[in-house]
Image (cartoon, helix red, strand yellow):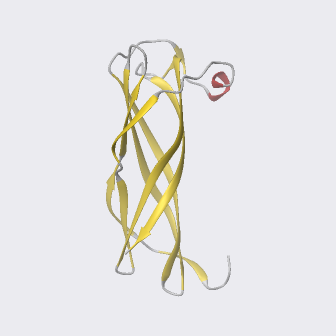
């Protein structure tokens, strides 16, 4: 980082998840993506970057027990590319020096592994996303 770019304190004001519906053959899955800010970089009193991580929640209308999710197993199982319908864009609002900053996730790709399940019987889901940032 340059000497002018510094990490800055911020306040989390509101966290709303991106909500998407995934249509599998015989199962409807709801996907919720929460963006959690980790750091905010400021240069000359302007927000230049927000570093965030995502929290993913998956809910099925027909949970069932199966082999447990595991990143190594995903490479040997076939993924399903479901039809994706965005219900809510969501967004995380933070305050930085009196400015409102909103970060949103934009889903680029979703892979579902219906033969692998989490502890609650929901299918394993792998999401690729990018972050969009708006400073007001």
Image quadrant where residue 61 sits: top left
60 lies left or right of 42: left
Quadrant where the image shows the N terminus: bottom right
Q: Is residue 111 above or below residue 129?
A: above
At x 43% / y 34%, what residue is drawn?
84
Instruction: Classify 111 as above or below 16.
Output: above
Residue drawn where x is 45% and y is 39% of the image: 56
Where is residue 74? Give x, y as percent. 63, 24
Residue at horizontal 42 percent and vertical 56 percent from the top = 104
With 71 as the anchor, is 115 left or right in this view? left
> Residue 52 in the image: x percent, y percent?
51, 57
The number of callouts visible is: 0
- In percent of the image, x 34 and y 51: which residue is there? 90
- Using residue 88 as the reference point, say whether residue 96 is left or right of it: right
Q: Is 112 left or right of 134, judged from the image as shown? A: right
Q: Quadrant of residue 51?
A: bottom right
Residue 89 is situated, as x and y percent measured from the top left of the image, at 36, 49
Residue 13 horizontal/vertical position (percent)? 31, 64
Above or below, 45 against 87 in this view is below
Image quarter hosting the C terminus: bottom left
Question: Residue 84 versus residue 36: which sits nearer the camera?
Answer: 84
Residue closer to the observer: 20 or 97: 20
């Amino acid at each position: 980082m340059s000497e002018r770019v510094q990490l800055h304190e911020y306040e989390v004001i509101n966290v709303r998840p991106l909500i998407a519906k995934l249509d599998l053959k015989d199962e409807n899955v709801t996907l919720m993506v929460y963006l959690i800010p980790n750091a905010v970089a400021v240069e000359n009193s302007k927000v230049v970057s927000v570093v965030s991580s995502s929290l993913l929640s998956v809910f099925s209308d027909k949970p069932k027990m199966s082999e447990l999710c595991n990143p190594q197993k995903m490479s040997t199982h076939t993924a399903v590319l479901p039809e994706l319908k965005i219900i809510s864009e969501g967004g995380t609002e933070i305050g930085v020096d009196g400015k409102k900053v909103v970060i949103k996730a934009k889903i680029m790709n979703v892979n579902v592994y219906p033969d692998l399940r989490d502890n609650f019987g929901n299918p394993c889901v792998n999401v690729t996303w990018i972050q969009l940032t708006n400073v007001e």
